[in-house]
Amino acid sequence: MRSILILELFVQYLRLVEGITHYTTVTACNTAGLCTSVTSDGIQIDTSPPVRGKVQDGTDSVDIHYQASNNSIGAKWFGFFDPQSGISNYTWWAGTSIGSDNILNATMLHQNELAVIPDLFGHTGHILPLRQRIYITVMACNRAETFLK
Ligand SMILES: *[C@@H]1O[C@H](CO)[C@@H](O)[C@H](O)[C@H]1NC(C)=O
Ligand SMILES: *[C@@H]1O[C@H](CO)[C@@H](O)[C@H](O)[C@H]1NC(C)=O
Ligand SMILES: *[C@@H]1O[C@H](CO)[C@@H](O)[C@H](O)[C@H]1NC(C)=O
């Protein structure tokens, strides 16, 4: 007897529960009816983005509103976390309006919670604009690839 072997299966519309590990078991049987089962190491469902943290302008211990340098930019953040899958990485950028990136393009950092560019001109070819508010945005990405800005 010939049978068709399926080596891949995609199942939709399952109602998997967040925070619980789900295992997949595959059973292979030979034509004599002897079977072996193997179970995966499991996946966890994480549909929610990380929990929002706080972002501080500058790398001092407190948030700054003014700085003298026209060539350095930095930020610190804390309190982002993801109870299901954990934070995978952060991306930061800066601009002259909320969420914009006209000062600094998105730059990925791994697990760092501090970012600084001491020589912005060397990095981007321009300095910081004078007497303008500059907004820094941090995006936290969890291991399930949902993110929060
Ligand atoms: C930027 O800062 C440097 C060093 O303080 C200064 O020499 C330069 O004139 C400043 N540039 C502008 C456009 O203000
Ligand atoms: C961001 O990247 C784009 C495309 O590479 C570039 O045109 C733009 O000048 C960059 N912006 C900054 C602020 O460096
Ligand atoms: C950053 O995290 C996202 C989400 O998990 C992932 O897709 C991406 O590959 C990560 N980037 C790096 C360089 O680790």
Image: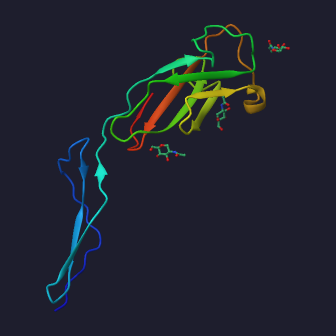
Residue nearest the observer in this picture, 46 or 83: 83
For image coordinates 20% across by 47% down, the residue present is: 16
**Quadrant where the C terminus lies?**
top left
Q: Quadrant of residue 115?
A: top right
Q: Residue furthest left?
A: 33
Q: Is residue 97 left or right of residue 8?
A: right
Report the label total: 0
Quarter of the rendering containing residue 38: bottom left
Which residue occupies 38% across, 44% down? Answer: 144
Rendering coords of residue 20 (x, y %): 24, 45
Name the image quarter holding the N terminus: bottom left
Colour scheme employed for the rendering of this structure: rainbow
For residue 50, above or below residue 8: above
Taking 49 as reference, is 122 left or right? right
Q: Residue 97 in the image: state x and y as whole percent.
A: 55, 17
Q: Is residue 60 left or right of residue 79?
A: right
- Residue 24 vertical placement versus 92 (above, below): below
Quarter of image, res 47? top left
Q: Is residue 59 above or below residue 81?
A: above
Q: Is residue 33 above or below residue 82?
A: below
Q: Nearer the viewer, residue 112 or 118?
A: 112
State the residue at coordinates (52%, 23%).
77
* Percent position of residue 134, x then y: 61, 15
Ligand 1 located in image quadrant = top right
> Going by the image, does 65 lie left or right of 146?
right
